[in-house]
Amino acid sequence: MFKINDNYQKLPGSYLFSTIAKKVAAFTEANPDKAVIRLGIGDVTQPLTAPVISALHAAVDEMADGATFHGYAPDLGYAFLRETIAENDFRSRGCDIGADEIFVSDGAKCDSGNIQELFAADSRIAVCDPVYPVYVDSNVMAGRAGTYDAATGYWSNVIYMPCTEANGFVADLPKERPDIIYLCFPNNPTGAAITKTQLQMWVDYARKEGCVIIYDAAYEAYISEDNVPHSIYECEGARECAIEIRSFSKNAGFTGVRLGYTVVPKDLMCGEASLRDMWARRHGTKYNGAPYIIQRAGAACYTEEGRASIMGLVEYYMENAKTIYDGLKKMGYTVYGGVNSPYIWLKTIDGMSSWDFFDYLLERANVVGTPGSGFGPNGEGFFRLTAFGTHENSKAALERIAKL
Ligand code: MLT
């Protein structure tokens, strides 16, 4: 008989957002008359903007003509997009990143799950607690996490870095040395942001200890405060120790379109081995590139008109963040996030567990959120609401919660 990768058997339950979707589907089936408002998964609700739609139409027309048709995309991404990204997302902010260090992909989720392939099987990872589940689950699948303790919710071989009210949801440096450190700022799920001084401390630590930082900046467009870095490469020395992952999902609304990219600088070396070359080798072997029409849509986000339209989307969602944040505060909830982030992180009431609060909101207000404990043990007693709904639904959800 063939053998399976039995690391998959170690994973408890299903993926967090699949579990929630199943619970909500069961509720709506049992209560077809109830209109459920979904503020759970961070999925966008607003349509693609006009410049993006025009670029898509034009690219589709190109595909209809033999003279302008495109077959396989270059597996690292088209030069027109990589150059645009390097210039606009990095060099314009003073970050020394070249187009040949940018790897275009079909999204940040895939990249954040796949990047661990570059590292030795016995590498130790450090994650924030609570954390976006993909970082841990993908390392469980690769056999790096050890064994799961259902009582504590921790994996034996993972270093957890608590993110709590006491540290403002920005982890302290780990007590043991990891090989790989996952950081996500602005943070999913807590909505916390990191200052440049704090991030520099992580970069200095990684260089001193010989660690690599996987920096997930998928929510970068939501940064509103000046002292919050948009890229880890704003920190000195980050080219030697950090990989950065970006997404077009949350800023340009590409959750259903799929486009992202990863930056692997040439200075990131392990002895003689270049991680940039390794990632290029992986892309070449396992990936045929994001579709031409989608990369054209991505490039359209960087024109003057494109930028303005994307900022319009971000402003739309941030208005919801304010509605939710202010509304909950007024009701007496303890609330975090929502300032540099589309996520609002609130404390449950009356010491309710995160899942009890999930059921309470679903059953009594017909509002879906995400239980904090689904992101890790330190998320227990917290709950996440997303600002990616419509204005109408965000307001209606608040009105329903106020009536409880
Ligand atoms: C979330 O809700 O945490 C995100 O939407 C999930 C994702 O981007 O994969």
Image (cartoon, rainbow, N blue to C red):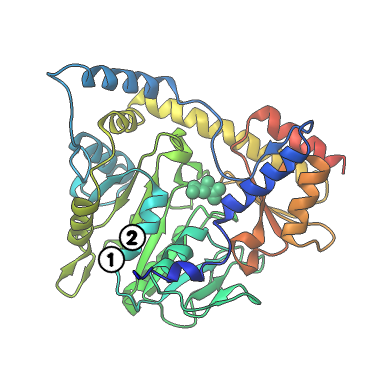
Please tell me whether residue 276 is drawn above or below residue 212 in the rendered image: above
Q: Quickly name the residue at label 1.
A: 118
Mark 1 within 8 Å of ligand 1, using the beta carbon = no
Q: Answer with the quarter of the image where residue 28 lies.
A: top right
Instruction: Name, please, the residue furthest toward the left.
Output: 67
Q: Residues within 10 Å of mark 2 (few under 14, many from 20)?
A: some
Q: Residue at x 30, y 31 (%)?
A: 299
Percent position (x, y) of residue 182? 43, 64
Q: Answer with the quarter of the image where residue 199 lies.
A: bottom left
- Residue 198 makes an appearance in the image: no
Q: Residue at x 31, y 39 (%)?
A: 88
Instruction: Name, please, the residue furthest toward the front.
Output: 1
Numbered disc 2: secondary structure:
helix
Percent position (x, y) of residue 347? 74, 57
Q: Quickly name the residue at label 2.
A: 115
Q: Amino acid at mark 2?
A: Ile
Q: Do residues under tags 2 and 1 come within 8 Å of each other at their CB atoms?
A: yes
For the residues labelled 2 and 1, the Cα–Cα distance comes to: 6 Å
- Residue 317 makes an appearance in the image: yes
Q: Residue at x 56, y 31 (%)?
A: 45
Percent position (x, y) of residue 251? 46, 37
Q: Nearer the viewer, residue 94 or 165?
A: 165
Q: Answer with the quarter of the image where residue 122 lies.
A: bottom left
Q: Nearer the viewer, residue 352 or 89?
A: 352
Percent position (x, y) of residue 220? 45, 46
Q: Quadrant of the C terminus?
A: top right
Instruction: Name, please, the residue furthest toward the right.
Output: 403
